[in-house]
Image (cartoon, helix red, strand yellow):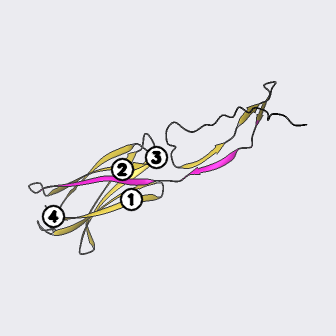
Amino acid sequence: MTGAPEESTATTWSPVEALFAGHYWWNVETRDADFMPAFSPAREFIVAPEVRLLSVRLSRATFLRQVTVDLRWVSNAHDVTTELRFLRKGRVVGLTRGHTETLISGDPERGTLQWRAPRRVRPGTRLVARIRVMGAGQSATTQRTIRAP
């Protein structure tokens, strides 16, 4: 006996917004012709963590002997740490960190870090500024060369 295939009404789902990094479980409810529910077994899936730097802008205030870094990034981690490290000939001469909470996964975030040069770092000294954004075990790093204020 042959005939037309039975019609199927399939429904698909995808999140409206990006999910945060982590473990999730998913199951499907179906209903038969009498509207009796049946559930699939729960299936685990993992959203991998992601951190991307979008932009970095450094500015010096020589009178204050201060460097300000404005940075933008995208992450799906709940907690994000920003770090600014200054190196002179490979040795750390300055370090500052910031911490922020991501409100919407995948939306661009913005932060500012400031560092005041200590007396032992002479004005005009060539430094490497290493900027790092970390979250959920992932990180994004870039570096720029700058003169000490």
**Residue annotated with mark 4:** 148
Residue at 75% x, 32% y: name it: 7
Q: Which circle marks residue 73 in the picture?
A: 2
Residue 115 horizontal/vertical position (percent): 22, 57
Amino acid type of the residue tagged 1 in the rendering: Ala
Using the image, determine if residue 88 lies above or below residue 59. below
Q: Position of residue 16 (x, y in %)?
A: 51, 36
The extreme right residue here reads 1
Question: Which quarter of the picture shows residue 83?
Answer: bottom left
Q: What secondary structure prevails in the magenta region?
A: strand
Residue behind mark 1? 140
Question: Which amino acid is tagged 4?
Answer: Ala
Give how far across and how far down residue 136 sits, in percent. Answer: 48, 54
Q: Foreground residue, 41 or 66?
A: 41
Three-letter amino acid code of the residue under disc 2: Trp
Instruction: State which quadrant residue 33 falls in.
Output: top right
- The type of residue carrying mark 3 is His
Please name the residue shown 28% across and 64% down the image.
143
SS category of the residue bearing label 1: strand
The CA distance from mark 3 to mark 4 is 34 Å
Neighbour class for label 3 at 10 Å: few (<14), some, many (≥20)?
A: some
Q: In the rendered structure, are the residues bearing label 4 and label 2 in contact, judged by CB atoms less than 8 Å apart?
A: no
Q: Secondary structure at mark 3?
A: loop
Total marks shown come to: 4
Quadrant in the picture for the N terminus: top right
Closer to the chain start, of discs 1 and 3, is: 3
Q: Which residues make up the magenta segment?
A: 39-61
Q: Are marks 2 and 1 in contact (CB under 8 Å)?
A: yes
